[in-house]
Image (cartoon, rainbow, N blue to C red):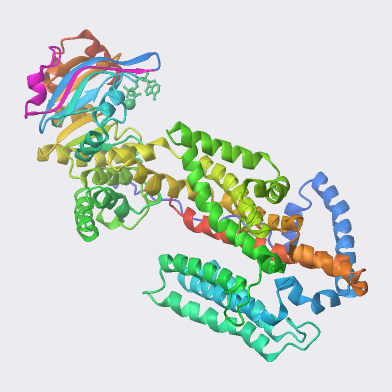
Amino acid sequence: MATAETWQPAPSLPPPRIETGWIGWARANLFGNWLSGLVTVVTVPLIVWAAWRMLGWLFGTADWTLIASRPQQYLIGLYPTELAWRPLTGWLLVSILFGMAAAMWGGAARRIAIGYGAVTVLLGVLPYGLFHEGVVMPWWVRAFILGNLLTLGIGYLLGMNPKTGRPRNFVLGGIAIYVLLLLILIGIPGVPGMEEVAPRRWGGLMLNLILAVSGIFFAFPIGVLLALGRRSNLPVVKVLCVVFIEVFRGVPLITLLFMSQVLVPLALPANFPVDSVTRAAIVITLFSAAYTAENIRGGLQGLHPGQAEAARALGLPGWQVTTLIQLPQAIRNVIPAIVGQFIALFKDTSLVYIVGMLDILEMGRSIVQGNVQFTDNGRENLIFVAAVFWIFTYTMSYVSRRIERNLGVGRR
Amino acid sequence: MATEAAVTAQEALDQDNIIVARDVHKWFGNFHALRGVTTTVGRGEVVVVIGPSGSGKSTFIRTVNRLEQHQQGDIFVDGVEMTDDVRNIDAIRREVGMVFQSFNLFPHLTVMRNITLAPTKVRKTPMDEAEASALKLLERVGIPEQAEKYPGELSGGQQQRVAIARALAMNPKIMLFDEPTSALDPEMIKEVLEVMKELAASHQMTIVAITHELGFAREVADRIVMFDEGQIVEDLPPDEFFNNPRHERVRRFLSQIL
Ligand SMILES: Nc1ncnc2c1ncn2[C@@H]1O[C@H](COP(=O)(O)OP(=O)(O)OP(=O)(O)O)[C@@H](O)[C@H]1O
Ligand SMILES: [Mg+2]
């Protein structure tokens, strides 16, 4: 042996080739064994047949005149036509937030903003009247709708500017726009053009969105407080929170909504200025807060006890251990559950038909029932409403998945 | 150092003793985990604690910063008695750093933020100052280039070194280590022990470390304290501890872990 043999690592080889292309995929996934082959052979023709019929109906038989002739009702319900510029103005404000988000977070936020902008343009150039039913869309309505591109752009610039494009400003701006929007919709007594429009007359998709956003907006912080209260060492606080959570989780939302109309007034002075919509919104919010609280409590319980110990050992006072160490981790771990909860909340806003509100679903139903020419178009109405709901809920779960992914990378 | 003899009140106030424990008892339910622990630790002393599993080592050092409450006896840390008084506890925790077996870094914060969190929130150190000293600490533990990563992106040895830096950032007078290397792969144990040795050699702080790294104990400890069944069975300088222990129990234990 002249020299010691030098050790050579084995070369790194590419992975073995698997069959690619759709034939390979089908062989692996659809005909992997005789059972899956059988399932494939039976179900695929069924699916194709059903899809064929469905598509045939969607693009052949179905008559979408109903949707095309009543967009205003679907969007804002019975909000007075001559005051439609007010919801349109609110819409302009909301676009600022989409623009800001796109600039600040990029990725998913940008894709959503692009989709949002595209839909806006589409609505703005539609041949028929989005507002002022039966009339060709007046130029000023088109201007309002296309104006969203402008405010989207303004938001984008605000988001790009390092001075204004901060998460804090986004949140504060969001709150300001939320308050302003409600003010614009309700009106200011005595100001011309700003006549009061009671929330009872709000409707359509606008109502679903306002109820959902209000619900999420308040349910989250209330849920956090309830979750912390339930873990509190103070017996009174703890018992109150447990009772609240269990009552609101134990009773169906429909029941709570009825109660809000019938029972709550008994507990309030006769002319207490809370209208039925606000009461419904409060009930939906509290219902959602109870579920959010349980989600967050689950997240807190899932944390390693060493986290709080390490924080306490560093001398952090109890409330900072909670707010800086435990809550951020707990909330992050339950984002999917919370988003699921908010999706449920958005869908549940349809239940306000119980208190006589014309949300998008109920609005559609009453268009179908109230117009002889549309009595056969119930299906088209339902499919349209379902699609609208789906677009919003799918966007929410898409955002949730992106957030999860971004937070998950190497940070556990 | 007085171990078997009861510590007198005088000793408690003695400026040379930074930790004084007198007849400390602790129960978990009916389980008597600490059964009369009496010991003192002098300023700048390096004490290694060993003993079989379940003997109460962790429980004892956790009573020093009150992660566990004792139910009988007295503990003084830097002249302050450990009671339920929250101000005392917070004051002591600022002076006592702790390093855990499972690191317990905050996974949602960067390495830098892990280190600067307590100084900025508890001591109100300005952020730029805190970051500058955090960088120095990261250099001291040998990983200045990892500052902007998240804990999950580091190896176990690196995480434990960050945890040491995080504790040091509060400028503690005492550092407690609870088996800092026993969750680490062999090749990472050394890098953590090096950091601990450097700390011990600097003689700037009091160190109480639970560890079964006997080489480390032999090299840097002033005393080795052995726990068994919730009591201290032996308390001697390393030489005597290994060569001439007074209790047969020590020999039996050493033969088990060697
Ligand atoms: N929170 C607790 N609740 C109940 N029993 C506990 C608790 N913490 C510790 N004990 C018990 O107290 C005893 C002493 O535990 P301790 O953790 O102090 O042991 P240790 O000497 O550190 O052991 P190890 O080497 O395994 O870490 C053990 O029997 C343990 O089961
Ligand atoms: Mg232990």
Vertical comparison of B242 with A369: above or below = above
The image quadrant that residue A367 belongs to is bottom right
Vertical comparison of B88 with A377: above or below = above
Q: How many labels were placed on the picture?
A: 0
Looking at the image, residue B118 sits to the left or right of residue A412; the answer is left
The image quadrant that residue A81 belongs to is bottom right
Q: Quadrant of the N terminus of chain A?
A: top left
Ligand 2 positioned in quadrant: top left
The image quadrant that residue A22 belongs to is bottom right
The residue lying furthest to the front in this view is A270
Looking at the image, residue B222 sits to the left or right of residue A227; the answer is left
Q: Nearer the viewer, residue A336 or A271?
A: A271
The residue lying furthest to the top in this view is B248
| Residue A381 x, y percent position in the rendering | 83, 67
| Residue A56 x, y percent position in the rendering | 89, 70
Q: Nearer the viewer, residue A33 or A148?
A: A148
Residue at 21%, 45% in the rendered image: B170
| Residue A163 x, y percent position in the rendering | 36, 74
Residue at 66%, 46% in the rendered image: A266
Residue B142 seen in the current view: yes
| Residue B218 x, y percent position in the rendering | 16, 27
Looking at the image, residue A105 sits to the left or right of residue A204; the answer is left
Q: Is residue A57 magenta?
A: no
Q: Is residue B18 magenta?
A: yes
Vertical comparison of A72 with A227: above or below = below
Q: Nearer the viewer, residue B13 or A334?
A: B13
Residue A55 seen in the current view: no
The magenta segment is B2-28
Residue at 24%, 27% in the rendered image: B83
Vertical comparison of A284 with B94: above or below = below
Q: Nearer the viewer, residue A10 or A147?
A: A147
